[in-house]
Image: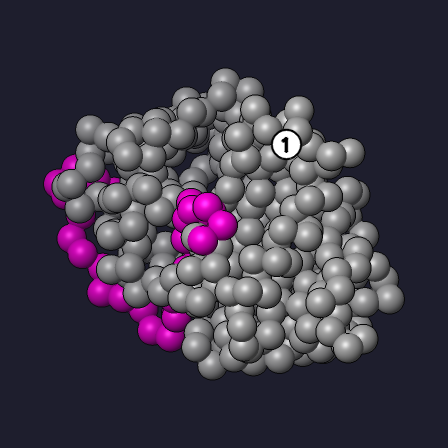
Amino acid sequence: MEFIPFSEQHVTAAAHLLVHQNENLLRRFPLLPERITELGATREFLTALLQKPDSHGMVLEKNSKLTAYMLGSYNENPFFGRHCWVPLGGIALPRNNIQHVFRNLYAATGTQWMRDGVLNHYLVCPDMPAWQQAAFSLSFGREQAYAITSLQKPLEEPALPAGIKIRLVVPEDANQLFDIGHWIATHLNKEPVWEPVPQQHLDAILPEYAKLANDDTSTTMVAVEGEKIVGYVVLYTVDVGPGHLLGVPSAGEFAAAAIDPAYRKRGVGRALFTRLINEACQQKYKTLFTDWRTTNLVAASYWPTFGFETFAYRLLRRVNPRYQPFIEK
């Protein structure tokens, strides 16, 4: 086995490998867009990923033939810290000997990440047992589930609790949306998620929630009691373009959803989310994506009841920072 830094000369061979892998993925998860099996789309995706600032990866060649690769890019934010992000499609493996190849490929690729002082490693991997077993053997753990559901027909809407109504957001809702934008972040603090929510993160997201009141690129619905917003849900078209392998105009994204803690377990959420799913059907979306923390016990059991099927997981390994003095530069 020979490991070589991923470069432009490897894109076409890697794209062919990704197409072959995605053909198997599409057979297992037929709701995923067919574009993941198109050579032009995979080539554009890998080119865009390679051209990102601080993009780093390795290819595995055997007898001068590319047989696997891992490619990600560095970034930094309040939640993840300084990290390397390998998206879905950023890894391709041979059909056989997956665990051996995965382990050695990560060791080779991660060595450069470590030399650059990047200790938080995120891999978005398809929901395939052999992949996850290989990652778990390297001390990765699951953090986020990515799921998809079909929108072939509207759902029957449950009755609303007395005094609750559902409507589209209006500009006058901006201040309330700002004030309640912390609901999701607050929930992440609770057991057994136990995720810190930095104030820097809240300072960044709360104005974005307020903008939903006037955003013509999304559909936001709110549940209200009188003038008080007690729940909200947001629908977008998934990101499209060369850097987004799953992005097609016919796919929507359940981008955010939250209910006032005082109104939970009363059917408000189910009625609100069902209404938005039916709105997505009316907007001619064919599929709907969403994601959730795997440690969020409520979300992990709730979203599958709407037909969402997990097709990928975000895996995370945090290397002990006390190892830094031993990193060979």
Taking the spot 47% from the left edge, 47% from the top edge, the residue there is 140
Taking the spot 79% from the left edge, 56% from the top edge, the residue there is 5
| Residue 124 visible to the viewer | yes
Q: Which residues are magenta?
A: 137-165
Taking the spot 51% from the left edge, 65% from the top edge, the residue there is 99
The count of marks equals 1
Quadrant that contains the N terminus? bottom right
Figure check: 170 above or below 123: above
- Residue 18 x, y percent position in the rendering: 65, 72
Amino acid type for the residue under numbered disc 1:
Arg
- Determine if the magenta segment contains residue 171: no
Q: Nearer the viewer, residue 215 or 111?
A: 111
Quadrant that contains the C terminus? top right
263 vs 290, left or right, is left
- Residue 312 x, y percent position in the rendering: 46, 60
- Determine if the magenta segment contains residue 140: yes
Residue, far top: 199
When asked about the image quadrant of residue 162, the answer is top left
